[in-house]
Image (spheres, grey):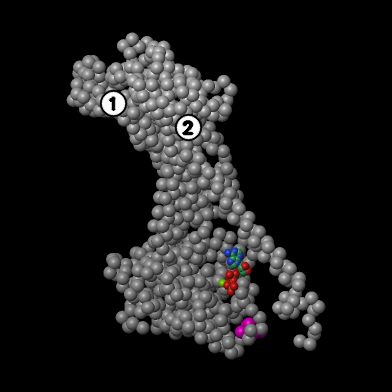
Amino acid sequence: MSSPAPPNASPQGSFITEEALKRLKTRHAAERRFKLYGQVAIGIAVVALVTLLISIFGQASSAFSRHVLTFDTTLEAAQVDPSGTRDPGAIERNVSGFNLLLQDELAAQFLPEDADRNLQRELYGMFTRLAVLPIARETADRPETVGTRQSFSVALADDIDLYLKGGVSNRTQVKLGAITPVSGSLEDTVVVEFGRDTAGADIANAIERFRAQGAGDNEPTALIQMGQTWFRATDITDTTASLAYVAGARTMPGADTQGAALVLEQGQENRTVTDRQLAWTMLLKDQGRIKSVLNTSLFTNSDSTYPELAGTAAAIVGSLLTMMVTALLAIPVGIFAAVYLEEFAPKNRMTDLIEVNINNLAAVPSIVFGLLGAAVFINFMGLPRSVPLVGGLVLGLLVLPTVIIASRAALKSVPPSIRDAALGVGASKTQSVFHHVLPLAAPGILTGAIIGMARAIGETAPLLLIGMVAFVAEVPDSPTDESTVLPVLIYKWSTGAERAWEPQTAAAIIVLLVFLVLMNLFAIILRRRFERRW
Amino acid sequence: MDGNVEDFTETTTPRQAENMAEMIKVDCRNIDVFYDDKQAIFDVSLPIQDRAVTSLIGPSGCGKSTFLRCINRMNDTIEIAKVRGKIYMDGADINDHSIDPVLLRSRVGMVFQKPNPFPKSIYDNIAYGPRIHGLAAGKHELDGIVESALIKAGLWDEVKDRLTAPGTSLSGGQQQRLCIARAIAVSPEVILMDEPCSALDPIATARIEELIDELRERYCIVIVTHSMQQAARVSQRTAFFHLGKLVEYGDTERIFTNPEDSRTQDYITGRFG
Ligand SMILES: Nc1ncnc2c1ncn2[C@@H]1O[C@H](COP(=O)(O)OP(=O)(O)OP(=O)(O)O)[C@@H](O)[C@H]1O
Ligand SMILES: [Mg+2]
């Protein structure tokens, strides 16, 4: 009261000293700093996630659509059913007969009578041999259509598809205006005159730009379209050009035909699609016969050596079957083990030892479980290789520790007063656990189980060791059929040599992600339901 | 109270003719309790009267709860706890191997310090005990048990319209009365209460005390309390514990007016504890 205020007192009052203010300031600064660290951490996580999603979806986008050729044909009985029995099996097996139908139709349109085998192979190479398999199946299902005219669509080969989606080579298009042939012949060179002054210069500029970008000995190509005919430019000046015939109508274009140039960064020796194939593709496209459709075969087809035919159906079913086995093993066993350890087991050395071992087991690399599975289930117990049963058992063992640990944590979090209450009214230990503790722990246990399953569904390594990497072309019907799973399929596709595997792989990753999201959603819904009961 | 409520303590009727003061329901003799090697209760002998409220008082940590839990063998659930000595209930040794603790606990109900209703409906809270013991033959009978338990616990009027509401949605005092109703519903003979009012406000406490006073006519009640006033108000007999030993036991009136032991004197006058 009468004692004087300290010399360094602040105006707020004697108890807010200079020193206290300073401490307060550092404390506030520390708080702000910590908040900033947190925000930066969240930011990094979000950026990483977004980048991942963008890159995967960006890559996969092209896999979700696919280019098909519509194709009308008469299902000649002699071609598609040489035996004449209309036996569906025989029709379905006669893939080469259907291939001939397709090839004949294309050849009639694009090939001269005397086309050599190389030219034929180039044209037929726009489709894989199995592209007609769906047609064969469709016909086998409806043998009465043999002999009638039908409309089908067939998938274009992966490289053509990729080209149509903007891949294979960088390109630019140049409108040329009217073009008039002045001399030469289709067999040799055609010399043309551009109606527009700068047409030749525009092409030359485009070529020059690509050449500047391109590496080393790569020579850009300029393809010129005049009406129904495609040429390759061999020599270009500002107003004239020498052209070599590539594909299309074999008649000399008339005077003042509207033309366009397609300048490609790569020459055909550096491309997977030849100039002729490009020209044919463009001609078919101009006819409106090439369409982009939703790639449903990604979900309905099984694996294939051809990326445009490969689908995830077998792997999805395989994953489902495997998860079923995993869940049937890991969830009940995990819950019962947790309940026993947490509620019934005496606390002694033995249970301590078991607890330590379970915790360690959760950290064992998954590949070790694969080795164990191969040794025990396949070699010792004689179960078949590559089947979801074995895969599920291995994954079940793998996630068992996770489920046990999560379930124990959930059981531990149930207040002891509930146990006391139950025991207090004369419930037995088992009754108190099953009537009260377990239902209260259910949401937590469920979360643990789902986390375990989510880990299992993404596992690849242990499944490789038990042979689930085998090529499986059939959708498995039961857990004892040969099968593969999504992550293994992704691994296999990612090692494919063709460029088209890249979007395919990304698409399969998205399927896996969707699987995971659905599982988590399911868990959340179940959680809500359980929690609402209280 | 409702006059139609049946008498749940029929088993003791033949002895009702005897002098009330002499009627011993639970006879504890030479009880020792150990937690591992640490002894918490030292040679306590305490005969507990039927149809009366016996309060256990004493400073914190003196072993009141431990002793209380011996009576319904809740100490069995604590792995490190070992109980020595004899406890007779109606002349039968409750620690005998032939007596199942589950059956014992259906005859000795317990109310805990913190209200701990099951996270279920009010109805299911009460009905749980009768269900697991098979006390009701059908839904109708079960409804009757629930109703009479709630009436006896003085909660019926407050909850009769919302029996399906969760028990945890009640107020603290109502929850504690729900727990008492839950204990009553299995027709126990003895009710143990471990500081049943410590989490409640004075009004809820008064309500529970009133209830205990009513229940006294039918049950043998043992209550642990930290409140001298509460012990004085509700109990007929009082036992004072100190450091695990029973220091003094007698009529509440005498303990509070004329304690024999100086430690009791010190405690009730607030000199320690
Ligand atoms: N589960 C237990 N494990 C080990 N020691 C215990 C356990 N429960 C109680 N004890 C010990 O036994 C002694 C008596 O405890 P108890 O809980 O019976 O005291 P209390 O009289 O009920 O105390 P309070 O009035 O604070 O509730 C204390 O020393 C306590 O540390
Ligand atoms: Mg206590």
Residue that badge 2 annotates = A502
Residue A421 image offset from top left, x and y in percent: 46, 66
Left or right of residue A329: residue A286: left
Q: Quadrant of residue B135?
A: bottom left
Residue B266 image offset from top left, x and y in percent: 65, 84
Question: Could you tell me which quadrant the N terminus of chain B lies in?
Answer: bottom left
Which of pointers 1 and 2 lies earlier in the amino acid sequence? 1
- The relative height of residue A170 versus residue A331 in the rendered view (above or below) is above
To the question of a shared chain for discs 1 and 2, the answer is yes
Left or right of residue A403: residue B120: left
Residue drawn where x is 43% and y is 78% of the image = B219
Q: Tell me if residue A142 can be seen.
A: yes
Residue that badge 1 annotates = A71
What secondary structure characterizes most of the magenta part?
helix
Q: Amino acid at mark 1?
A: Phe
Instruction: Using the image as rendered, state which of residue A405 and residue A61 is in the foreground.
Output: A61
Residue A199 image offset from top left, x and y in percent: 45, 27
Cα distance between the residues tagged 1 and 2? 28 Å
Looking at the rendering, the stretch of residues picked out in magenta corresponds to B262-268
